[in-house]
Amino acid sequence: MDFKFIKNLIDQAEAFSKKHPGSSDMNLFGQWLVEKKSVAAPRSFRMPEMTATETLESVIAKLIIYLNRYARGYSKKALENKKVGSLDEFVFLINLFNAGSATKMELIERSRLEKPTGMEIWRRLLDLGFVVQENSETDKRSKNLTLTQAGHEALFESFEVMNQVVKMLTGNLDDFEKHQLLELLQKLEDFHLPIRQTAKNSSWAEIFEKIG
């Protein structure tokens, strides 16, 4: 009996238990082993060139900004002949569709928009007849938005081309790389969202202290 192999297996099972407490799913354990091996294996990677004034963080930020611009460029082309006019409008409508009903400010927050931009989008969608306002049953001071039939049709008309846009954005990443990227982006989202929600009246110095 190869006790070295058994010890290694026990060590791997212990590491798996720390990552997935309480799980005894052998399929998940097998998948975790494959992913762990893929991470450990050398992968071809082209490190971007950095100028003397750039840092690792600044290059990451630059590439994230570029990716956002690619998304806006692709979606602008894709939506040229659609009733939905922009990426922001699509995100606003799909968030409302998923919520069923929500206030303007809830939708602006879910879409991660600044208030002036969000209000402009809301007014345009209201003028187009894509959304309707109704008095809230729980709070008479606020109004809930819901999608109209025209809003449903405009949103669903855009689904096919927007699915093509998101496939275009993930480009030449394989499935494993997509999962890696998703995990990293979610980690950043979990970091930034609480700051966005609580730091509206804070100075930059106060916000930056949060990473200290």
Image (cartoon, grey):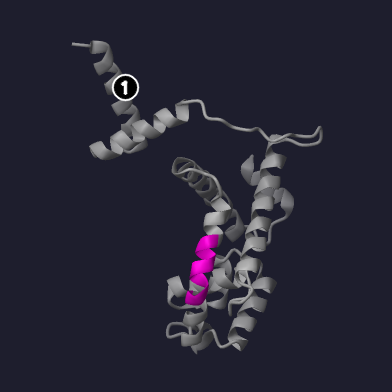
Total marks placed: 1
Q: Would you say 24 lies left or right of 78 here?
A: left
User: Within 10 Å of the Cα at label 1, are there few (<14), some (14-19), or many (20+) other Cα atoms?
Assistant: few
> Where, by quadrant of the figure, is residue 111 drawn?
bottom right
SS under mark 1? helix
Q: Nearer the viewer, residue 64 or 41?
A: 41
Residue 200 to residue 18: above or below? below
Q: Would you say 94 lies left or right of 67 here?
A: left
Does residue 128 appear in this view? Answer: yes
Image coordinates of residue 45 in percent, x first then y, are 59, 32
Range of magenta residues: 156-164
Image coordinates of residue 152 in percent, x first then y, are 47, 80
161 inside magenta stretch: yes
Q: Quadrant of the C terminus?
A: top right
Would you name the residue on which mark 1 appears?
Answer: 11
**Residue for point 60% across, 68% down:** 78
Q: Would you say 115 lies left or right of 175 here?
A: right
**Residue for point 31% across, 22% down:** 11
**Residue for point 58% across, 60% down:** 197
**Residue for point 40% across, 31% down:** 36
Main SS of residues in magenta: helix
